[in-house]
């Protein structure tokens, strides 16, 4: 009789463990979705952020709006890697990841060659 109770308790333990695991999986999925929603719009890679600082590029709200709109237009056309050129400089963007890979100011754009891009957007 005692052996049967032990087996029953083990089964209950396994069931309760599975229920806890399912709850935590839902929590993780919810947390992941929340984080993904936070990253709407473009982001700067560590390299690009460093270049912005080194090159004295001012990242204003207007510039961010322009860059986001340019990336959305490029995305609609099926672009993957795009150079966005404006009066503030040039920004190389990986469109599928909404990630600015690097940037340069207007002086550095002169006599420069942009490689590994499939599209360009002028803002």
Image: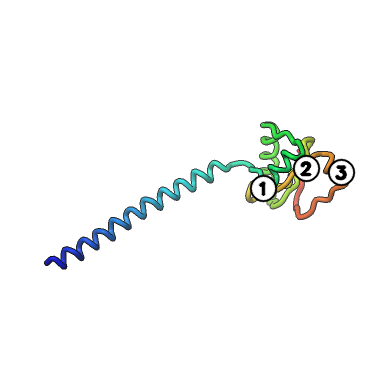
Question: Which quadrant of the rendered structure holds the N terminus?
Answer: bottom left
Q: Earlier in the sequence, mark 2 or mark 1?
A: 1
Q: Earlier in the sequence, mark 2 or mark 3?
A: 2
Q: Residue beneath label 2, please?
A: 104
- Which numbered mark, 2 or 1, is in the foreground of this view? 2
Q: Position of residue 90 (x, y in %)?
A: 77, 42
Image-based side of 69 in relation to 86, left or right: left
Q: Residue at x 85, y 48 (%)?
A: 112
Label 3: how many residues lie within 10 Å, few (<14), some (14-19) or many (20+)? few
Q: CA distance from mark 2 to mark 1?
A: 22 Å
Q: Earlier in the sequence, mark 3 or mark 1?
A: 1
Q: Position of residue 78 (x, y in %)?
A: 68, 51
Image-based side of 19 in relation to 121, left or right: left
Q: Residue at x 78, y 42 (%)?
A: 104
Q: Which element type, helix, strand or loop, lies under badge 1?
A: helix
Tell whether label 1 touches label 3 (CB within 8 Å).
Answer: no
Q: Residue at x 73, y 43 (%)?
A: 51
Image-based side of 115 in relation to 66, left or right: right
Tell whether label 3 touches label 2 (CB within 8 Å).
Answer: no
- Which numbered mark, 3 or 1, is in the foreground of this view? 3
Label 1: how many residues lie within 10 Å, few (<14), some (14-19) or many (20+)? some
Q: Which element type, helix, strand or loop, lies under badge 3?
A: loop
Q: Position of residue 36 (x, y in %)?
A: 53, 46
Q: Which element type, helix, strand or loop, lies under badge 2?
A: strand
Question: What is the number of the mark on residue 93?
Answer: none
Instruction: Pick the residue in front: 89 or 80.
Output: 89
Q: CA distance from mark 2 to mark 3?
A: 10 Å
Label 2: how many residues lie within 10 Å, few (<14), some (14-19) or many (20+)? many
Question: What is the number of the mark on residue 75?
Answer: 1
Q: Residue beneath label 3, please?
A: 110
Q: CA distance from mark 3 to mark 1?
A: 27 Å
Q: Position of residue 105 (x, y in %)?
A: 79, 39
């Amino acid at each position: 009789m005692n052996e049967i109770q032990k087996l029953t308790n083990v089964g209950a333990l396994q069931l309760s463990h599975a229920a806890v695991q399912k709850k935590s999986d839902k929590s993780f999925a919810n947390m992941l979705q929340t984080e993904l929603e936070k990253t709407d719009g473009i982001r700067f890679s560590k390299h690009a952020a460093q270049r912005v600082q080194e090159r004295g590029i001012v990242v204003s709200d207007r510039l961010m709006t322009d860059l986001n709109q340019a990336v959305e237009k490029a995305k609609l056309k099926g672009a993957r890697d795009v150079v966005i050129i404006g009066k503030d400089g040039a920004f190389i963007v990986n469109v599928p990841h909404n990630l600015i890979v690097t940037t340069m100011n207007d002086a550095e754009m002169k006599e420069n060659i942009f490689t590994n891009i499939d599209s360009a957007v002028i803002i």
